[in-house]
Image (cartoon, rainbow, N blue to C red):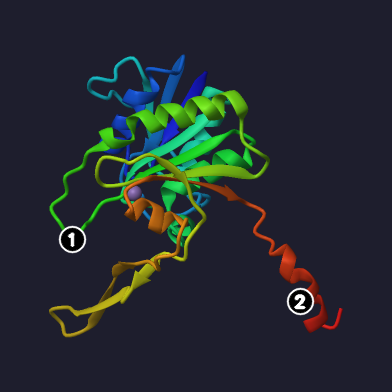
Amino acid sequence: MKVLISNDDGIFAKGIRALAEVVREIADEVVIVAPAVEQSAAGHAITIRSPLRYTKTRLEGLEDITAYRVDGTPADCVMLGVANEGKPDLILSGINIGSNLGFDVTHSGTVAAAIEGMTMGIPSIAFSLRVDFSKELKLDFSHGKEHIKQIVEMVSRNGLPNRTLLNVNFPDAETKGIRLASQSEHSYEDSVIERIDPNGKPYYWLSGKPYGQDVPDTDYTVVTEGYTAVTPLHFDLTHQSYMSQLSKELGL
Ligand code: MN
């Protein structure tokens, strides 16, 4: 099994190291291709108006793994990684510092790397660790270790359906087990924060407090309850059951 790993926190982030350390125990070959600097919330952007560099990078303690950094986005990394290293059996992204739940999946560079893999017909999985950014960060990626092995081995055996990827979120404490979860409407409230610069002019931070409705068996609720949430995301976004109503409403 040949595995390509990327992320959006950057090649030197602790989460991609944690993922590589687990995956190299079960894969024949691991290649890391990841952004040179953090690309969180880059979404599925690709770089088309400037050139990209693909730079071999030594990662302390991971010398058995070939790694490249790219001065671009997570989706750029997957495109260059597949073009330069050949098609892998699996693409993994993460482990992201911070969960990717609900509507986050559209902003997330972590999930976008997996989406890019999925569009190439390669089974792809995104991993994220829930973190309470309002408290001191105590990053413990070991919570997900056994679940990563279980999920990666299952996907390498069975593959994934067409247009489908897995979005996996770990809780911020010892996980109570794996549960399947639907995508929630998790978002952020008060997400535009205005400040005044030294010249008296306003500037803005896009941030805000995580906001999630407690709906049973959704990603937000499952991970908040302390479980590893596994959500199969399907990229036919067409709302099939609304088609007939829409057809009537448009007089078609
Ligand atoms: Mn990130």
Q: Residue 32 location in percent, x, y?
A: 40, 28
Among the two numbered marks 1 and 2 on one chain, the one whose residue lies closer to the N terminus = 1
Q: Amino acid at mark 2?
A: Leu
Disc 1: CA contacts within 10 A as few (<14), some (14-19) or many (>=20) = few
Q: Residue 3 location in percent, x, y?
A: 48, 25
Cα separation between marks 1 and 2: 43 Å
Q: Is mark 1 within 8 Å of ligand 1?
A: no
Disc 2: CA contacts within 10 A as few (<14), some (14-19) or many (>=20) = few
Residue 21's image quarter?
A: top left
Work out whether residue 186 or residue 11 is closer to the camera in this orientation and state it: 186
The quadrant in which the C terminus is found is bottom right
Residue 9's image quarter?
A: top left
Q: For the point 41% across and 64% down, which residue is it?
A: 186
Q: For the point 42% across and 36% down, which residue is it?
A: 6
Q: Is residue 179 visible?
A: yes
Helix, strand or loop at label 2? It is: helix
Helix, strand or loop at label 1? It is: loop
Q: Which residue is mark 2?
A: 246
Q: For the point 49% across and 58% down, which residue is it?
A: 106
Q: Residue 190 location in percent, x, y?
A: 31, 77
Q: Is residue 240 above or below residue 18?
A: below
Q: Is residue 89 visible?
A: no
Which disc, if any, is residue 134?
A: 1
Q: For the point 51% across and 49% down, which residue is it?
A: 46
Q: Is residue 1 above or below residue 102?
A: above
Image marks 1 and 2: residues in contact by CB distance under 8 Å: no
Residue 142's image quarter?
A: top left
Q: Amino acid at mark 1?
A: Ser
